[in-house]
Image (cartoon, helix red, strand yellow):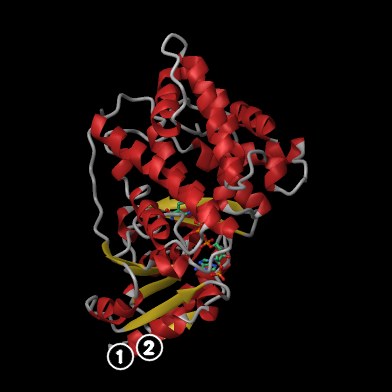
Amino acid sequence: MENFNYYTPTQVVFGKNAEAKVGELVKAQNCKKVLVHFGGNSAKKSGLLDRVYASLDAAGIEYVSLGGVVPNPRVSKVREGIELCKKEGVDFLLAVGGGSVIDSCKAIGYGLANDCDVWDLYEGKVAPTGAYPVGAVLTIAAAGSEMSNSSVITNEDGWYKKACNTDYIRCKFAIMNPELTYTLPQYQTQSGCTDILMHTMERYFTDVDTMELTDVIAESLMRNVIRNAKILMKDPQNYEARANIMWASSLAHNDLTGCGAVGDYASHKLEHELGGLFDVTHGAGLSAVWGSWARYVYKHKPERFAQFAVNVLGVYNHPEDPERTALEGIEAMEEFYRSIEMPISIKELLNGKEVTDAEIDEMAEKCSQGDTVITGHFVPLKKADLVEIYKMAR
Ligand code: NZQ
Ligand code: ZN
């Protein structure tokens, strides 16, 4: 196993009615003025925003609001947020929403603390030296941004989707009330479950020898998410299932399930190009490409895929033929995705649209930065490999 540095500074306040504590949590940050950042209509419609404002009012906190963050959040909204915060003297950022709103908040936090165009940080032209503090009231269990070191932003100028990852932007606190996720459409719930699984799978499919404890935690988390995703297909108001999924979203992406490993993240990189070009839901984009990625790379270490098949999916073990067990595991995973109505090809993801060769080339070109950057770690992939995987997934 690899040496590791495990850093999770986020205070988690979990459970029914947890959002009522937002005022006192913000107050403890000793800030002067807060930006309340949110997405489309869901937080308004559910009454959550009003409850957040009431809690801030009760704690005597001054605030300004900025809504309109869209899924695959845009850098234009981030720039608008930076300008507003400068004008208003904002020194704390509160995200009320999902990964997109939290990531947009984190990007504003970067922009306020670094004297450059914020996109330069996402392009890797400038390394961030700090960030304004962020807190979150989570409304969807999925991206894990509430405890991750990551922010993913889309630039409409060329449709690039890129991440900027540092410990500066880990949330100060995350408020998680599973009941807030009752209003999610089933497609978003299940895309979220898919993303949660993938955050652990990206860490699990590693080229290095792993730590037994990390494997055991990862495998039980994945089994738990699969079981509860199935429960939510039939019973979306099941509090226990919502609670398990919400906590899994954080644990799958706060590095707990990757201690001692080196993550792969090729499926995420492949998906980010789909998200950039076609504006698809992130989790659904992941299930659309994962099986093709897995079939392209599993022969590198079939025993690892066989372990996943047996320990996570309950596939029958053929000890004399790990490749067979591995392949049956990939099929079982795709069967699970089907059972929760997630796509397992790009055509299904795009509702019947065939992705063209030119679009595949564009995605592979952007992902590999003109064939100068390697994607993935389990098997390092060049541009030609990415083209092949997209073709298998089409
Ligand atoms: O905008 P509203 O009206 O709120 O609607 C949202 C949005 O349409 C809706 N929604 C959220 N909570 C709801 C709700 N609808 C009803 N009831 C609720 N309680 O759900 C839709 C999706 O929201 P979004 O925030 O986009 O979802 P998610 O959390 O999946 O975030 C996806 C984004 O996070 C990035 C993805 O690439 C994508 O841009 N990721 C961020 C990561 C990170 N920062 O660590 C890691 C991930 O791998 C991922 O890349
Ligand atoms: Zn993800």
Q: Position of residue 125 (x, y in %)?
A: 46, 50
Kind of residue sitting beneath label 2: Ala
Q: Residue 301, which numbered label?
A: none
Placement of 134 over or under 58, stated as above or below? above
User: In this orientation, does residue 210 appear?
Assistant: yes
Kind of residue sitting beneath label 1: Ala
Judged from the image, the secondary structure of the residue bearing numbered disc 2 is: helix
Q: Position of residue 275 (x, y in %)?
A: 61, 51
Q: Quadrant of residue 336?
A: top right
Placement of 319 over or under 18, stated as above or below? above
Q: Residue 58, which numbered label?
A: 1
Disc 2: residue Cβ within 8 A of ligand 1's nearest atom: no
Residue at figure coordinates x 43%, y 44% from the top left? 199
Placement of 26 over or under 76, stated as above or below? below
User: In this orientation, does residue 381 appear?
Assistant: no
Residue at figure coordinates x 36%, y 36% from the top left? 219
Horizontal side, residue 362 vs residue 286: left or right? right
Residue at figure coordinates x 45%, y 18% from the top left? 302
Q: Position of residue 30 (x, y in %)?
A: 23, 79
Q: Residue 54, which numbered label?
A: 2
Q: Position of residue 55 (x, y in %)?
A: 34, 85
- Callout 2 touching callout 1 (CB < 8 Å): yes
